[in-house]
Amino acid sequence: MGTPSYETIFAQRVLDEIFPSNRADLFFAALLGDASEGAYDINLAYAGKTHDRVDFEFQLKQRPGKCLACHLTYGLPEVFLRHPVIDVAGVVRQIDSRMIDGQQCAEWTLGRIREVSRAMHVLPLTVKLTPAKPLAPG
């Protein structure tokens, strides 16, 4: 059996465990007081890997009967950075716990919201990689 790939270790079912779909409802309940007021669902998706980073994106998908384009999403990077329900740092810790090839997460950044379509916007999450430090003898 070969070494698993990043596509395998970050398959959508794994990312759904790291960032469950109900987190959007929890986010809108905390932010707006009512989960049904939220204009979009949020999921985490794998977007690729280079030699020194792995890319993900938070996908904001318009909910039926709502208007994602009318909803303010461009200020979200700052909100996501601070909001305890979204917990980007916790997401990165879970990503780090699944790293392979002797890599570990060194630092992470959120990019700028990008409009893929009127019904979907994405917020890039870039995780810089570094060689894992060997465990000290114990």
Image: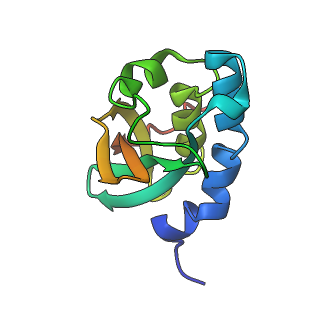
Q: Is residue 108 above or below residue 68?
A: above
Q: Position of residue 77 (x, y in %)?
A: 37, 26
Q: Quadrant of residue 22?
A: top right
Note whether residue 20 is visible.
yes
| Residue at 49%, 55% in the rendered image | 45
Q: Is residue 71 left or right of residue 63?
A: left
| Residue at 52%, 49% in the rendered image | 62
| Residue at 39%, 32% in the rendered image | 73
What is the quadrant of the C terminus in the image? top right
- Residue with the most extreme front position: 65
Q: Quadrant of residue 26?
A: top right
Q: Position of residue 137 (x, y in %)?
A: 59, 32
Colour setting:
rainbow
Note whether residue 138 is visible.
no
Question: Number of marks in the image?
Answer: 0
What is the quadrant of the N terminus in the image? bottom right
Q: Quadrant of residue 13?
A: bottom right
Q: Is residue 14 left or right of residue 48?
A: right
Q: Is residue 43 above or below residue 8?
A: above
Identify which residue, 123 or 50, lies in the foreground. 123
Identify which residue, 98 or 124, lies in the foreground. 124
Q: Position of residue 98 (x, y in %)?
A: 58, 51
Q: Position of residue 70 (x, y in %)?
A: 40, 35
- Residue with the most extreme bottom position: 1
| Residue at 44%, 52% in the rendered image | 102
